[in-house]
């Protein structure tokens, strides 16, 4: 019974394969479900665009109201202000005074991309300043150095588009699974490694499966919303 209770507690905190929301996500101030987006306006004109499967809460950071991204993806647009605005993502602290920042936290790590304006990302005693079109990644407890990136695929979700450029089928399916009900599984390593370029409409995400099959010649075996590509 003790083992079962421990496993149940772990599953509530860190659900396997993200099959259900964690306790922290359920208790968040703002949430979106799979395939849903939401926009919220917070104090001092801070605008937050929430992507699919996202949860966040307002918290106190250094005595001021800020945000904590629990899981998911947000684009935060800040008005020009003399006081820096701070928000937290896992063990990272992001501070900025203006501009738009895209932050994504999922099973692969954390990506922070400066769309415009400037921001600082701090982890422990390490700080990295971001200029427009720069990204920093946080993976396995390490804050990677910033790099310049193409913003198009990063901001596409705000226009209801999933833009995949030279993406492996495995990565493409991982993205589609964020929005589509059920789960798609790639049945072979060879198919998973295939590279594709495709533009998908988020308001027609069921059609994305047909697009992948047309591009790769894969066959889809479906049981309800659960699909195996082979």
Image (spheres, helix red, strand yellow):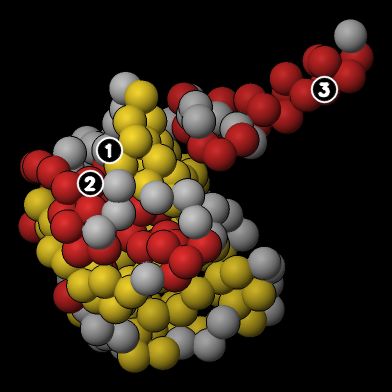
Pointer 1 local density, CA inside 10 Å: few below 14, some 14–19, many at least 20: many
C-beta proximity under 8 Å, tags 2 and 1:
yes
Is residue 204 placed above or below 84 in the rendered structure?
A: above
Q: Which residue is mark 3?
A: 6
Question: Does residue 72 appear in this view?
Answer: no
Q: Residue at x 24, y 83 (%)?
A: 150
Q: Where is residue 131? Give x, y as percent.
A: 32, 87
Q: Where is residue 169? Give x, y as percent.
A: 36, 63
**In the orientation shown, which residue stands out farthest toward the right?**
2
Q: Does residue 23 appear left or right of residue 147 in this picture?
A: right
Give the quarter of the figure containing the N terminus: top right
Q: CA distance from mark 3 to mark 1?
A: 31 Å
Q: Where is residue 55? Give x, y as percent.
A: 39, 39
Tag shown at residue 180 = 1
Q: CA distance from mark 2 to mark 3?
A: 38 Å
Q: Residue at x 89, y 19 (%)?
A: 3
Secondary structure category for the residue under label 3: helix
**In the orientation shown, which residue stands out farthest toward the top?**
1
Foreground mark, 3 or 1, reads 1
Is residue 77 placed above or below 138 in the rendered structure?
A: above
The quadrant in which residue 113 appears is bottom left
The quadrant in which residue 2 appears is top right
Pointer 2 local density, CA inside 10 Å: few below 14, some 14–19, many at least 20: some
C-beta proximity under 8 Å, tags 2 and 3:
no
Tag shown at residue 209 = 2
Q: Where is residue 223? Give x, y as percent.
A: 36, 24
């Amino acid at each position: 019974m003790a083992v079962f209770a421990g496993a149940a507690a772990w599953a509530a905190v860190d659900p396997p394969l993200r099959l259900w929301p964690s306790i922290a996500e359920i208790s968040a101030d703002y949430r979106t479900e799979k395939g849903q987006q939401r926009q919220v306006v917070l104090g001092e004109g801070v605008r937050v665009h929430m992507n699919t499967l996202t949860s966040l809460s307002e918290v106190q950071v250094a005595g001021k109201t800020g945000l904590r991204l629990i899981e998911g993806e947000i684009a935060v647009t800040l008005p020009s202000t003399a006081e820096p605005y701070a928000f937290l993502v896992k063990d990272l602290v992001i501070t900025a005074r203006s501009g738009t920042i895209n932050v994504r936290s999922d099973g692969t790590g954390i990506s922070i991309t400066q769309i415009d304006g400037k921001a600082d990302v701090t982890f422990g005693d390490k700080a990295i300043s971001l200029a427009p079109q720069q990204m920093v990644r946080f993976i396995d407890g390490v804050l990677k150095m910033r790099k310049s990136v193409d913003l198009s695929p990063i901001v596409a979700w705000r226009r209801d588009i999933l833009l995949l450029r030279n993406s492996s089928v495995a990565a493409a399916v991982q993205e589609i699974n964020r929005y589509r009900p059920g789960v798609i599984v790639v049945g072979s390593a060879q198919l998973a490694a295939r590279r594709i370029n495709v533009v998908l409409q988020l308001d027609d995400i069921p059609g994305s499966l047909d697009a992948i099959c047309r591009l790769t010649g894969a066959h889809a075996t479906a049981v309800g919303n659960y699909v195996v590509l082979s």
